[in-house]
């Protein structure tokens, strides 16, 4: 290797070491699933959950400049196994948040093709936080006396950001607005 490339190689290594800690953690801005539960319905069950969305100052700034933000909420009903769980029901719900400067209001697009307008950011995120999936989970999927897990995760969708903003969103921990999987045991 030519000696002129050695400083460049060490410089790249140092840059990677500086970026790596930010990539590994979501910080204070990662969403958090507060609870999720199955509720009995006619011939099945529905899911309710509550998500705490915490936007970083960088995400708020982008939002106020007209960049829509989107999250995919994944809900799974799992049957625990010896090596891995078996997913017996899965559903993905997409929520989108956008600021309309002319109206000075926030719009939330729900997965049910419904749009709601709010005067404050906290009102908009509180509306998104209450997940009510009315899609029926058939009762025949659950056997009485068997343990199950209800798993919920929210994933910030970086692919819906404008193209010039995407690389930064993958590297900057202020854009790590997703949650980890949260699971709750269910006994039916």
Image (cartoon, rainbow, N blue to C red):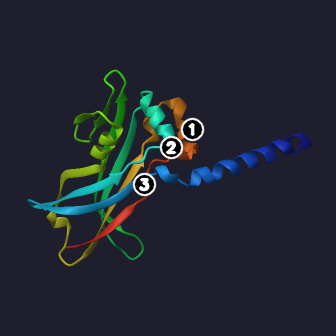
| Residue in view at x 45 percent, y 47 percent | 177
The residue labelled by disc 3 is 179
Q: Point out residue 79 in the picture as x, y percentages from the top left corner.
A: 30, 70
Quadrant in which the N terminus appears: top right
Q: Identify the image quadrant of residue 141.
A: bottom left
Q: Earlier in the sequence, mark 2 or mark 1?
A: 1
Q: CA distance from mark 2 to mark 1?
A: 8 Å
Return the x and y of residue 35 as percentages of the image width and height.
31, 61
In percent of width and height, residue 89 lies at 27, 59
Quadrant where the C terminus lies?
A: bottom left
Marks 1 and 3: CB-CB under 8 Å?
no
Q: Is residue 176 left or right of residue 90?
A: right
Q: Earlier in the sequence, mark 1 or mark 3?
A: 1
Q: Which SS class for mark 3?
A: loop
| Dot 2 and dot 1 residues touching (CB under 8 Å) | yes
Q: Determine the residue located farthest toward the right in the rendered image.
A: 3
**Mark 1 Cα shell of 10 Å, populated few (<14), some (14-19), many (≥20):** few
- Within 10 Å of disc 2 (Cα), the crowding (few <14, some 14-19, many 20+) is many
Marks 1 and 3, Cα distance to the nearest angstrom? Answer: 19 Å
Is disc 2 placed on a helix, strand or loop?
helix
Total residue callouts: 3
Label 1 sits on residue: 168
Label 1: state its secondary structure. Answer: helix
Residue indicated by mark 2: 175
Reply above or below: 75 against 169: below
């Amino acid at each position: 290797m030519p000696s002129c490339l050695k400083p460049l190689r060490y410089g790249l290594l140092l840059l990677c070491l500086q970026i790596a800690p930010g990539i590994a953690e979501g910080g204070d801005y990662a969403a958090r699933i507060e609870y999720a539960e199955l509720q009995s319905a006619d011939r099945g069950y529905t899911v309710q959950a509550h998500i705490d969305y915490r936007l970083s100052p960088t995400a708020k700034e982008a939002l106020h400049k007209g960049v829509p933000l989107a999250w995919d909420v994944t809900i799974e009903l799992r049957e625990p196994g010896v090596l891995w769980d078996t997913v017996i029901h899965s559903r993905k719900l997409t929520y989108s948040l956008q600021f309309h400067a002319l109206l000075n209001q926030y719009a939330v697009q729900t997965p049910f093709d419904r749009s709601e307008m709010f005067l404050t950011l906290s009102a908009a995120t509180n509306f998104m936080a209450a997940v009510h999936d009315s899609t029926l989970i058939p009762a025949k999927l659950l056997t009485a006396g068997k343990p199950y897990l209800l798993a919920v995760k929210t994933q910030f969708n970086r692919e819906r950001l404008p193209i010039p903003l995407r690389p930064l969103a993958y590297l900057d921990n202020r854009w790590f607005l997703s949650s980890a999987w949260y699971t709750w045991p269910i006994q039916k």
